[in-house]
Structure formats: C-alpha cells, structure tokens
Amino acid sequence: DVKVTQSSRYLVKRTGEKVFLECVQDMDHENMFWYRQDPGLGLRLIYFSYDVKMKEKGDIPEGYSVSREKKERFSLILESASTNQTSMYLCASSLAQLNTGAFFGQGTRLTVV
Amino acid sequence: AQSVAQPEDQVNVAEGNPLTVKCTYSVSGNPYLFWYVQYPNRGLQFLLKYITGDNLVKGSYGFEAEFNKSQTSFHLKKPSALVSDSALYFCAVRDGGYSTLTFGKGTMLLVSP
C-alpha cells in the first residue's frame, strides 16, 4: 500500500521558533508537495519539488523554505514561526506523469502561540 | 493558469437520496480532473479521476463523476447517500502545462439519517 508519512500529527511551537515538518514517501515518486489548508481557503501550494535538490515556489511561499536532499524525503521549514502560520499542513507525492493524481500524508496540525 | 471552483460551501442531503457535489474548472489545455475526500483531522484520500475516454467515471465507495467539456464541469455524484459519506470533498485539476494540482476550496457534505 502506498504511503506518505508526516513526522507529527500535532505540533505546538512558540513565535519565533524555527520549525521543521518532515515528510517521507515510499513510492519512489519524483514529485513532492507541501500544501497548507485553512477553512474557506482550501488547499494552497507552498512549495513543490520535482527532483532531488530541486524546488519551485507555489502560491504562498513567503515565510517558508524547503529541503529535498533525498528522493523520499521533503522537509518544510518555518524559519521564524508566526501565529499566522497556525494551520494544517499536508504533504503529498506523485509520479512525474501528468495523468496521475497525488497521494497525501495524514497532515500536521501546527499551532504557533 | 488553471483554476477550480466549487460553488457550494456545504451540501445537505438525507440518507438514501442521491447527492451531487459541483465542480467547474478552467485550464488552457486538456484537463486531468480529480476528486478527493477528507475526513476530520485526516489527509486527503483519492476518490476518482478523469483523464480521457468515457465521460462517466466510477470511483471508490460508490461515487462517480461526470465530465462535461462544454460546461467545463466535473460534478461528483452518488445514487444513494450514506451518513458515513459526510466529509469534506475537494475537486482538483491539472493540465499539460503544470506539474501541480490546483484544488477547489472544498465542499462539506452532510448526510442526515
């Protein structure tokens, strides 16, 4: 069974902290994504990566960075967490082919206090 | 650019009745269309997709969707709703010029006993 695993289900961090969200997929997928989900706004793309060490900005990259050192792992970094980054974060992966969908992790609910 | 609209924030239906969750899209090329479902505090689960071929696509849990090119729509349907179908549903689109999925804002489906 395909699997995308996010390291934490729930996180509480303080304003100004550096926060790492980790995501691992076991499907040998080329593409990996980080989305943010907020009520009434749906899913918004933060960053994606189509290969190791490659990254592209999504719709809302400000305040975030990413790292992909290995094919199976994609990390989202909040350099200095702020309260407006309190949200549900969803990692996903997919094959490179455009006719495939994406597989999602279970989500990390981050609260910044 | 690619975009998706889900015009209803919430759909209410009685158990046993047919349900429809609406989705319209905009792409520059041929669309690849997807429906996902999300249960509380969980990631997104794939329901079905349209790539090419028959306009009526069948998916998981008895759901189906009808692709209508002239109306640029991809509505999700089920002949007989279950209380357990209550969840948040997302429509997504991907076209030939993009590597990423664009999601709608989601529609909450509430099925009453």
Image: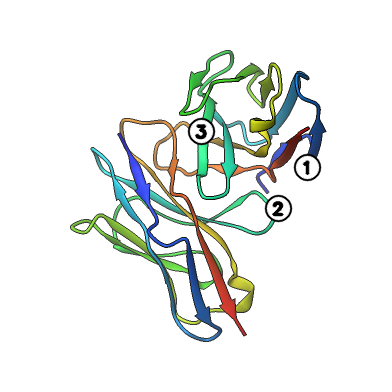
Query: Is B53 placed above or below A29 here?
Result: below
Q: Closer to the N terminus: mark 1 or mark 3? A: 1
Disc 3 marks a residue whose amino acid type is Leu
Q: Is residue B111 left or right of residue A8?
A: left
Q: Position of residue A108 (x, y in %)?
A: 72, 40
Measured Cα–Cα span from mark 1 to mark 3: 19 Å
Q: Position of residue A97 (x, y in %)?
A: 42, 35
Tag 2 residue:
B41
> Can you tell which quarter of the image residue B55 is in?
bottom left
Measured Cα–Cα span from mark 3 to mark 2: 19 Å
Q: Chain of mark 2?
A: B
Q: Are the residues flagged by discs 1 and 3 from a single subunit?
A: yes
Q: Is residue B34 left or right of residue A43?
A: left
Disc 1 marks a residue whose amino acid type is Arg
Crowding at dot 3, Cα within 10 Å, few <14 / some 14-19 / many 20+, comes out as many
Q: Position of residue A34 (x, y in %)?
A: 58, 32
The answer to whether marks 2 and 1 mark residues whose Cβ atoms lie closer than 8 Å is: yes
Q: Is residue A65 left or right of residue B28?
A: right
Tag 3 residue:
A45
> Can you tell which quarter of the image residue A33 is in?
top right
Residue shown at 36%/64% (left/top)? B75
Measured Cα–Cα span from mark 2 to mark 1: 9 Å
Residue shown at 64%/73% (left/top)? B84
Q: Position of residue B53 (x, y in %)?
A: 29, 57
Query: Is B27 placed above or below B60 here?
Result: above
Residue shown at 60%/20% (left/top)? A63
Query: Is A91 placed above or below B50 here?
Result: above
Local secondary structure at mark 2: loop
